[in-house]
Structures are given as C-alpha cells and as structure tokens.
Image (cartoon, rainbow, N blue to C red):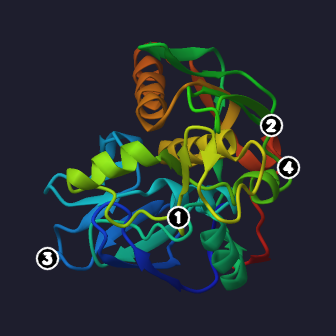
Amino acid sequence: MQATLANETTFTGVGVHGGHAATARVAPAEPGAGVTFIRTDLPHGRNHIPARFDRVADTRLCTVLANEHGATVSTVEHLMAALAGLGVTNATIAIDGPEVPIMDGSAAPFVRALSETGVVFQRAPQTALRILREISVDRDGKRASLAPADSFEMRFEIDFTDAAIGRQTRSMTLVNGAFIEELCDARTFGRLADLEKLRNTGLCRGGSLENAIVVDGAKVLNKGGLRHQDEFVRHKMLDAIGDLALAGAPIIGRYEGVRAGHEMTNLLLRELFTAQQAHGDVFEHVDYDRAMPKALGLCLTTA
C-alpha cells in the first residue's frame, strides 16, 4: 500500500553550498500525489517542483530538481533516501529557499524525526517497477546498471586515490529496514583541497566537519573519525537510493554502481524509461505488496 506521514515535521539547518539557513517542512500528502517540493519563497503557481528523475537539472555536486518555471531545489538526495527508506510514497516538502538543509551530512536526522512523526499506510495500492532485463550506462570509466532480481539489491564500488578512502565495495539486499540499520547514518565526504577550491568559487560555503567527512590524504579530519570503516561506499549507496527514488515507484531489481554518482544514476533512470517506451520489455508494473512482502521501509499504522 501507499504510505504518507501521520503528521508534519520541520527540519532546520544550513544549505551546504550557499551556506544560508534552510528550513524544510515535510507534511502528509494524498494517495497518488508522490513527493513534491514547494518553494515558499517563490510565487504561488510557479513554485511546485515534482521529485522526478526527468526534473533533474544538475548533478555535479548534488541532485538538483527544477520545474518549467526555473524554480530549483538542491541536495534532495538524503531526504529522498530517508523517505524511500521509510516507505513513504506521498509527501509535500515546503522549503524556504533553494537548498534542503544538509543536517549532519547523512539521512539519519531525517529518518529519526520522520519515524517519530509516524508513517501510515494509505488505502491505495502501491505499484513497483520490476526489472525484466538489464539496462546500463557507461561513461568515463563509470558504470551504473539495473538488472532483474527478486528484491531490491545493491552493489557499489568506489576507488579513490586518497589513502583514507581507497577502494571499497559493498553488496546489500535492502529489505526489513536494512537501509535504516546500515546506511542511513553514512555521511557525505570530500577532500580538504577540493573543499577549499569550491569555497573559492562560491560553493560549499555551508560545508564543515559538522556535516561532512573531510579527508586529507590518509587522514580523516573529523574528531570522532568514521561511523563505519566503509562509511564512504555506504554513503554512495545512500545517495543512489535517494536518486533512484526519483523513479516515482519502488524498484525490484539489482542496482550496481562502479565509481557512479548522481549523474550516472540519473542517466540510468532516463535510459530505463526511454528503453521501456521504445520496447516495452524493460520493466513491468507489479503490486508491490504482493511482490515484496518485506519492504525496503517501515510503516506503522493504517490511515
């Protein structure tokens, strides 16, 4: 069944790139509504931004959504991952500026607050996209693919020259709340040298050791160190879950990413839907509750 929130909850923090205060209010939505961002600082009628893969306008440092009027909202991936991880399919997110607050750089603050607010089933069926044949995209040594599987599975591989990160791989089957237990607290990360360069160009002005892991060669500069030995690849998986949520329905299949990021996952979704429109044999719509009795998320009551 579809799901939404029992009540609304508010997140206040800083936008990681602009460095400005940011507030997002996440509220329930009707069945079939999907997830929509609403820029409260922009004129009514021009400020609704659907959370869909075909609304992605930029993927260079985060996932940026835009509508036909040019309104944008950036860094949506962690909040989208939290909603998907909790099984929330319908929500309205009122935001007072162009960035979702970065919080601690992970999805954990969103997961905790949304769980406390409550997730409720709605009396409407939820469909899923069951992958029927492999679709992949390759670019500059990066690869992302979706292939048939019995549940939502993920394998990710990263390879960085920084000794603090190096090469990391992880595979998971994301059922029974595995996202909440193993991925949601993994933080975004970056290099100290890159952070300084980005700030000189007006970006990452809100970035700090409070909301990101910062590495310098073999050193992790955060006082508390890492939350997981492989926190870097876990965060890449978290990002991919948030970006895949822009498909508009849960996916039953195996996602694999090799040195992939926001761009590759969005290109993969675009290829998925283009191939489906052209051939009709890439995925099928199925009843999610029958196909996946043990869901990605965790719902609590029935509306």
Camera-near label (3 vs 2) is 2
Which residue is located at x 54 percent, y 69 percent? Answer: 210
Q: Are marks 3 and 4 in contact (CB under 8 Å)?
A: no
Query: Which residue, given by chain and number where applicable, does mark 1 sit on?
Result: 209
User: Left or right of 59: which side holds 116?
Assistant: right
Q: Which mark is residue 43?
A: 3
Which element is circle 4 on?
A: loop
Query: Which residue, given by chain and number where applicable, does mark 2 sit on?
Result: 172
Question: In the figure, 34 relative to 219: above or below?
Answer: below
Q: What separation in Å lies between label 2 and label 4 (alpha carbons)?
A: 17 Å
Residue 63 position, x and y percent, is: 39, 48
State which quadrant residue 282 falls in.
top right
In what quadrant of the picture does the N terminus appear? Answer: bottom right
**Label 2 packing within 10 angstroms: few (<14), some (14-19), many (20+):** some
Q: Nearer the viewer, residue 206 or 183?
A: 206
Which element is circle 3 on?
A: loop
Say which label, 3 or 4, has the lower sequence index. Answer: 3
User: Left or right of 71: which side holds 176?
Assistant: right
Q: What separation in Å lies between label 3 and label 2 (alpha carbons)?
A: 43 Å
Q: Which amino acid is tagged 3?
A: Pro
Camera-near label (3 vs 4) is 3
Q: Which mark is residue 293?
A: 4
Which element is circle 1 on?
A: loop
Camera-near label (1 vs 4) is 1
Q: Which amino acid is tagged 2?
A: Met
Q: Which amino acid is tagged 4?
A: Pro
Question: In the figure, 267 relative to 282: above or below?
Answer: below
Which residue is located at x 78 percent, y 77 percent? Answer: 301
Residue 5 position, x and y percent, is: 61, 77
